[in-house]
Image (cartoon, helix red, strand yellow):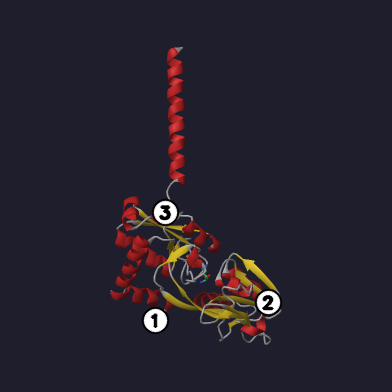
Amino acid sequence: MKKKIVLFIVIAVVAALSVSVLLTGCTTIDMSKAGPDEIKEYGKLVVATSPDFPPFENLDQAGNVVGWDIDVAQALADKLGVKLEVQQMEFDAVLSSVAAGKVHIGMAGISNTEERDKSVDFSMNVFNSSQMIIVREDNTSITGPMDLAGKTVAVQAGTIGNWLAEMDEDYAYNFDDDGNVLLDEPLLGEPRTVTKLSSGLMAIQQVKNGQADAVILDKLPAQTIVANLNAEGGAQLKILETSVYDDAYAFAIGEGNTALKAWIDSALEELIADGTFDELNEKWFGSSEE
Ligand code: ARG
């Protein structure tokens, strides 16, 4: 009888301990504060991305996440001497995961903006981009940003294209020299309807099948996705020459994580100086220029 009670207590204690180990394993690591030394100790660099944005990140035939950002992520992990773990999520979860300390870095063609800089920190800028307008080839009524007035515009949720289409005051207007928004100087005509989707591809498909008039999307992904869809046949698409907005990509890290910021920026400088960036630009963009 006594033996049975002891055995029961032992089992109960072991069970309780293993539950608490599991819980602490899941809940207590705040990665937003981890500098290079903590990441080395942890043994892996955890990167968040949204693999729907070729050539920066996409899924290959085998379902692996590939792209320019992923190769840069691997180069950073190699420099730290740790493994790379890429976590896939929708774009609007990437920045919140960084802010919540669930990952070390967000690498997802993320535009570096003042507004976002309030909740995360950014590395140096790594790529210059523009927000482009995509319409059907046969569309003659939309020839530039102002013609989006009254139209249906499809966007990827949480992106700059989303904030532009919704006439967000942080993005969709000119600013004066003191940083005050000039509401009488919009960068685009106000759409009547904004359709938010989970990827740029889904947004562009809406234009292709006539459910939306236009998409606002980053230049290289727009070119890549439009070329792929046009090659499939059916209604053809085009990208307007005039962009809506110019931006620059950077990698997002935890707010105030100065140790990681300093490390990443010097690592990126090295990758630029030793030609790695040129090679990756050539591999993914077909040119060594930004
Ligand atoms: N550059 C745009 C932004 O930061 C779009 C980024 C979308 N990235 C992605 N992996 N889907 O809002």
The span from disc 3 to disc 2 (Cα, nearest Å) is 39 Å
Question: Which image quadrant: the C terminus?
Answer: bottom left
- Of residue 174 and residue 20, the one placed in the foreground of this image is 174
Residue highlighted by disc 2 = 191
Residue at position x 44%, y 65% from top? Answer: 121
Residue highlighted by disc 3 = 31
Q: Is mark 2 within 8 Å of ligand 1?
A: no
Residue type at mark 2 is: Pro
Position of residue 255 measured from the top left corner of the image (x, y, whole percent): 44, 61
Position of residue 87 measured from the top left corner of the image (x, y, whole percent): 46, 57
Location of residue 78 with respect to 171 vertically, above or below? above
Q: Is residue 137 visible?
A: no
- Of the two numbered discs 2 and 1 on the same chain, state the one appearing first in sequence: 2
Say the numbered circle drawn on residue 289.
1
Residue type at mark 1 is: Glu
Q: In this view, does 89 lie to the left or right of 143?
A: left
Q: Is residue 143 visible?
A: yes
What is the secondary structure assignment of the residue under circle 2?
loop
Mark 2 neighbour density, 10 Å: few (under 14) some (14–19) many (20 or more)? many
Asked whether disc 2 touches disc 1, contact meaning CB atoms under 8 Å apart, the reply is no
Position of residue 72 measured from the top left corner of the image (x, y, whole percent): 38, 67
